[in-house]
Structure formats: C-alpha cells, structure tokens
Amino acid sequence: MKKIIKWLRRIVIAGFVFMICVYSISYFIEAPDLNGGHIIRMYDQNQKLFYQSQQQSNDVALKDVSPYFLKSIVAIEDHRFYEHRGFDPVGILRAIKANISAKSHVEGASTLSQQYARLMFLNNEKTWSRKIQEAFLTVRLETHYNKDTILQGYINTVYFGHGIYGIQNASLYYFNKKPIDLDLNEASMLAGVINGPEYYSPFKDLKAAKARQKIVLDALVEEKQITQQIANQTYSTPFQLNPHPSSTIQCPYPYYRDCVINELKTLGFYTDEYVNQGLNIQTTLDTQIQQQLNDVVEKQMKDRDELEVASIILNTQTSGVLALVGGKDYATSQFNRATQASRQVGSTMKPLLYYIALENGFTPTTKFKSEPTTFQLENGKTYTPTNFNKKYAYGDVTMAQAIALSDNIYAVKTHMFLGEQALVNTLTSFGYQHISPHPSLALGTLNTNIYDFSSIYTTLAHQGIYNEVHTITKITNNNGDVLYEYEPQNKQLLQQDTCLMISQLLTAPFEKSFQSYASPTMMNYPVKTKFAVKTGSTPYDSLCAGYNPQYTLLSWVGYDDNREMNMTSDTRIPKVIFQTMANELQKENLWYEPTDTLQVKPINPITGDYQENGLVFWFKESS
C-alpha cells in the first residue's frame, strides 16, 4: 500500500511539474493570433469576395450580448470557467463517473477554453495528436488572454447550426434580434443549441429544443443565477422564432459555398496544416448567373411543400461551375442535392447511348419499330419497357424522331443491338464503377447526382473534350503562396464528329414538326437561341439537361423520400428552369459548325427521307 501511495505521489508531483513547465513555455511563446490565418475567403471569377468564414473572434463585444446568454453559456458548457486555468479536473472526474455509470447522457469534459482552441485552430478529428495540440493551445490561450477575451472569442466562433457561426448571426437567424436584446427564454434556448445543432435547433425539432432548454435553465438554477420559479415560468413561455430565417444568412450562395468546401476537402486542403495559413480561394462562380438561377428556382418552387430541386450551370469550354442550387431553402435543409443526392437520371442518359450508336454506324435516320415489346434476356427473364403514357408509333421511327419524342422502345432496342456492355464501358470512362449491364440502363437507371453527371454533357457540348467539373481555380495562403492551381485536362474522350451529330440531333425536342403519336418533349418550352436538350423522368424524378457551345445546364426535381410525383406541374419545373435560364444567358445565337467530314442533310422529320426544306441534321460521309 505504501508503494502505491508513493507512486501516486510521484505521478502527482510529476504532473504538477509538467504543467508548470507547459505554462512557463506558453508564457514565453507569443500569444495565439485570434484574428489569424484560419479564415477561409472565397472569390468569384471576377475576384470579388462572396464568402468569408464566420469563424472570427472579435465581432461582438461581451457588453453587446445579453447577460442572460452569457450566464447560460457558462452554466451549461463550463460552470467553473472563471475558476480553472483551461482544464477542469472536477469536470473531468464528473464526466468519467457519468460515462462509466451510463445512467445519463454521455458527458464531455471540454472547457470553454478547450472548445475555443479547437474551433479556432483545429478540427474535430479524434486523434491523440489533435488532443495534444488542443491542450497546448488551451494553455497558450489561458496564459496570454483573460477570461472575458476567451469567452468573447468563443461566442463569436461557435457553431449554431444551419451554417450559422457566432452569436450575432445566431440571434438574427433564430429570433431576428440583436444579441443584446435576447431575453432569458431566447438566450437559454440558443445556449442549448450549441451542444448539438442538428438535434436541438427549434427549426428542426421544437420538442428536443425545449427539452435541451430545460437542462440549461436547471443549470442556471443550480448556479443560483435564477430561481426555480423563474426557470419554470420561462420554460412554459413560448418564444417567437424568426419567420424568415434564410434572409439573415450572410452567404447568399450557401450551396455553392458548400460545394467549394467539399472540393477543398477532396483536394486535401481542408486540414489544419492549410486552413491555419488562411485560404484564399478563386472560384468559377458567376454571381450574376447564380442570382438569376436563385430567382428562377425560388419562383418555381414557391408553395411546393416538400418538393425539392437541384440545378447547375457550367461553362461548356472549361467545365467550371458558374452557378449551383442544391435545394429550395438552405435554412430548412443543408443537404446539397446537386452534389450529394443519388437519383436515377431517366432519359437524360439517352444522348450518351445514341453517341455510341452513331459511333457504330447508326445515323439520324436509322429506324426501329416503336411498339409494345417484351425483350427475352440471356438469363431467361424478360424485360417489358413502356413509352410515356403508353403511346407508340406502331411502325418505324428514326433516331431523330425517337430523340424528339423520347421513345423508350427505340432506346432499349438500340441498347440491346449494341450490346449492354457498350454503354457500361462508356460510363466507366467517365468514372462510374460497378455498373451492371441491364436493358433498363438505356432508360437511365444509373444512380448519381447532376454534379457528377454533368461531365457527360459538358464533354458532348465541348465536342468530345473532357475536363473535370470543378469550382476551384486557384488557392493561395495569406502569404500569397500558391497552394493549388487548376490545370485543365482537355482530354479528347469522345469523337468530335459524333458529338457534333448528337448536338444537332438534340435540337429535335424543340421541333413541332416531329409531332405524331407523341409530342416533342420541349415543344412547349422554346428558347430564343439554339440549344441541345434532353428531358428525363422516372416516377420519382424529373430532369432537363442541355447545352450550347457556351453553357451547360442541368436541373432536377423530386422528393427526398422518393415519393412519386403525381402533379404534372411539378414535373415541368426543370423544363421551365432550363427555358428561363437559356433565354437569360444567351442573347445571340451561338451554335456549332459541322466539320469538313460531316454532310449536312435536310430530312423529313417523320419518314427520315431527304426533303429539300426539311429539318437539317448532320451525317458522316460514309452514311
């Protein structure tokens, strides 16, 4: 027993000496820069700042914040904040006891100082190296700054959910108030949100938010900051949430910003090593186009209840993302459907299928019979696709007519004729993996998102030249060092003449002269200048994708829970977005020119025969 006590005494003494050394070293090392290089700045393609990360420490002084909030935050997050020197041994022991007993919610023992150090300079990786860095930074904060400075930095830096950082942004977002005007009811609720914004935001779950608020109020009672009577009265009093929270979000393009952050992670620059240097990110954003897209999406999605939307506009020549929308309301949902959703693309797959067909000897006038068809598969099973509304020609149709009317029977027959592996192989060249060959692939059973899928359309639009879809063109740190610069691949992935043929064919959906057993899919959505376009649909998705030599546009609508869309007005939204944006973007006609190896032929839109005043399509010389 004496040996154990002796060793314990040595450990305590060693720990005490170690802490003295750490604090002494920290004293002589310069203070951490609270306005330092951790800020991320994003610039549009004209080098104009459109976003600066909200993780800054001196936005709002303590005197300009409600005392109710300051007392609440200390009571619930670190009630011994003004007593300890960065670490709370009592809190650590209490957390260990609570977590071992598991009789209550698992507790953490991080002090406000520790949390602030992590928020300012580190990330949330649960590694020993990060914990050691956090501990050392905490000591440096406590050594060089007083408690009020640390608390002020913390409340201006901490995350409140919905993309909101700092008490000033949070009080505006949740209550449309300045921080100084928060009452006890509002302040205690906001203090509770910090522990888990995804769970305790009253916009997401009011019941959970109130339950968390009660814990905050109980902590205030325990700290003798308020009486139990006041706590009970406050808890039973409803608060008035801001009816228009999204109007207070400082970044006007939050889905685009999140897309840039995601690309930053993919490139490997969203780490402590780089973020702490300060990152200045040049992007491909065109703020005028982005605002136009925001406006048309808002107008089309008004009063659409739970229906959701995603839309993207790219520079055809570079594959740079000019504008992006990932949902109808970022305040309601930060899920970016443009980049994160996994949805079927429907008939927007067909241009790639028909590209392969043209590469294998098909022409715009190649015919298949459009009629109800059951396909016998090699595994003994059958596949019976149908046309939209079960409308068929009951006779031969050309590729041009099949594209105009989005005939599914023609597409599947083409797919089976070429061999199911042909489409799989071409998709693989665009980075898609583990795709099973199946007749339904011709009708777009591929699960993806419009961000990734857009690379197929930009490649077709750029006459077969592939460039990776991107938002970032250059990254520098605060010293001006270039950390990254985008280099276009300019890879000739598809054959130029065949892409030109497809582009001309994709003008067919606008042409009224294809009207027959069905209507051209874009006949009622004409555009002022020439565009290639293809629509797509499943019972759960509606899409429209198109391009010209300058712009590529893709839009999708659907329900997040894969509910069927029964309203025709809902399924038309991507077409309206395409039509509106195409007319906004393109004021003068800009179209492709056939190469010397392509023949220009006017044809009868229904029969495919030569017709002097018919619709013009392009053919390879051997055709």
Image (cartoon, grey):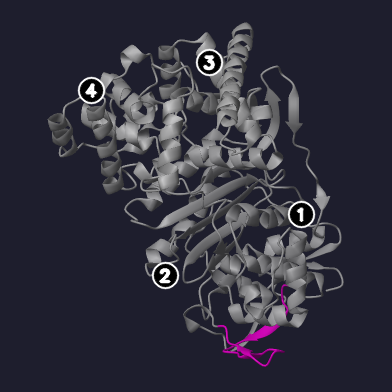
Report the span colored magenta.
364-385
Q: Secondary structure at mark 1?
A: loop
Residue 482 in view of the camera: yes
Q: Is residue 19 left or right of residue 596?
A: left
Label disc, if present, on residue 141 of the rendered structure: 3
Mark pair 4, 3: CA separation: 27 Å
Q: Position of residue 504 (x, y in %)?
A: 69, 62
Task: Give amino acid for label 1.
Answer: Gln
- Of the 4 image quadrants, the one containing the N terminus is top right
Residue beneath the point at 70% across and 25% down: 476
Task: Give amino acid for label 3.
Answer: Leu
Q: Nearer the viewer, mark 4 or mark 2?
A: 4
Q: Nearer the viewer, mark 2 or mark 3?
A: 3
Tell me the residue that label 4 is attached to: 225
Q: Nearer the viewer, residue 101 or 309?
A: 101
Tell me the residue that label 2 is attached to: 564
Task: Give amino acid for label 2.
Answer: Glu
Mark pair 2, 1: CA separation: 36 Å
Label disc, if present, on residue 162 of the rendered structure: none
Task: Give amino acid for label 4.
Answer: Gln
Q: Is residue 472 left or right of residue 512?
A: right
Q: Nearer the viewer, mark 2 or mark 1?
A: 2
Residue beneath the point at 24% across and 34% down: 218
Tell me the residue that label 1 is attached to: 463
Tell whether position 559 is magenta. no
Q: Is residue 28 left or right of residue 539?
A: right
